[in-house]
Image (cartoon, rainbow, N blue to C red):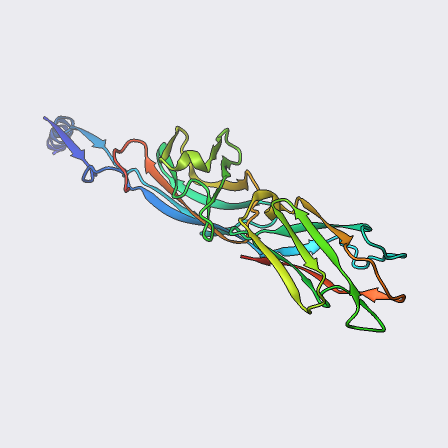
Amino acid sequence: MMKKCMLVLFIFSTFYSVASDDVSLTLEGYIKAKCGFTMQENDLQFPHNGLVSTELVINCNSPMRMSLHSEHGGLLHLQGRKVNGYRVSLSVAGLSLSESFLARNLVDSHTLNIDQILFKKTMNLQLELTEPLIYAGEYKDILRIEMTPAASSGGIW
Amino acid sequence: MKKLITLSAIAVLTSGTALAENLNVGGAVESICEVSNVNTTTYFPALAKDQTKTIGFDLQCNDADGATMSLTTAEGHLQNADREDQGVGYTAELNANPFAFTLVAENGHNDQSVEQSQPGSFALAAGGVAGTIELTITQNPVFSGTYADTLMLAITAN
């Protein structure tokens, strides 16, 4: 009776060592490059001091390209058709990013490559008149801003 | 035996999502058309022919189309206080670049006016134009007494 019990235990042990195996799991993921931003203010009116600014909250998960385009190359005087120049300056607090452009140089869209990832970052956009508004009446321009992930091609123009 | 299990989560590969927004940029400038720093009283203590007085003023009109200036004499001459049909003639020559014209007030007809229109300019819009009105007495007074006229200087945006 004692011999029989010992034999059973041996067989079980042997079976256990043979049943081992290796499993490799390779896990991959992909996140689509995406750029978006919201503007604090979509309508900016120059006050008497000729200086106005707004903030852009940027959510871009990759390096990106930023394009700026001025429809008139300055503030178009609607009654007289004269164009008054202004300067566009942009900067991001805490980053070395700081650029400045004259609106007249943005008639042909200007593209800026940004190597840094601006995710949940606030960009300050400041506009400053380069010459005072003299003639009475209304002045208007449309500044178009586009942000595109740098890894992708094309845009949405 | 080895088992290889690959778990993938690859989405359809497309270009990244971009976003564009339009920022409307504007400004407004109120209309200003005015004459300032003008002395509104001019006095000839001993009225006589060929006497002159010069009145200075500053001019600003920021209408892009320019402005129209006018000089209007109320009495048509320097009218005698005691006899309205008696007076002394004078001319008022206005110079405020680019404006230049002369009002002749010698016949005593009320509300005679001369005006001139000029296109807009940066100097006129910015308020950097200084002007003068030179008054010249063209006739000798006959009667003693006080002579007076009201000369109105006006500027209107075109």
In the shown orientation, is residue A57 left or right of residue A19? right
Q: Nearer the viewer, residue A109 or A13?
A: A109
Quadrant that contains the C terminus of chain A: top left
Question: What is the x, y in percent for residue B74?
Answer: 71, 67
Asked whether, in this view, residue A99 is left or right of residue B131, the answer is left
Where is residue A119, by image quadrant? top left
User: Where residue A121 sits: x, y (%)?
Assistant: 46, 40
Residue located 84% across and 71% down the image = B81
Q: With B129 as the anchor, is B122 left or right in this view?
A: left
Residue situated in front as seen by the camera: B51 or B129:
B51
Q: If the image is split into quadrants, where does the N terminus of chain A sit? A: top left
> Which residue is located at x 67 percent, y 68 percent?
B111
- Seen at 66% across and 45% down, the residue is B129
Q: Is residue A61 visible?
A: yes
Tally of numbered discs: 0
In x, y percent, where is residue B32?
A: 61, 55
Task: Answer yes or no: is residue A6 visible.
Answer: no
Q: Position of residue A153 (x, y in %)?
A: 25, 33
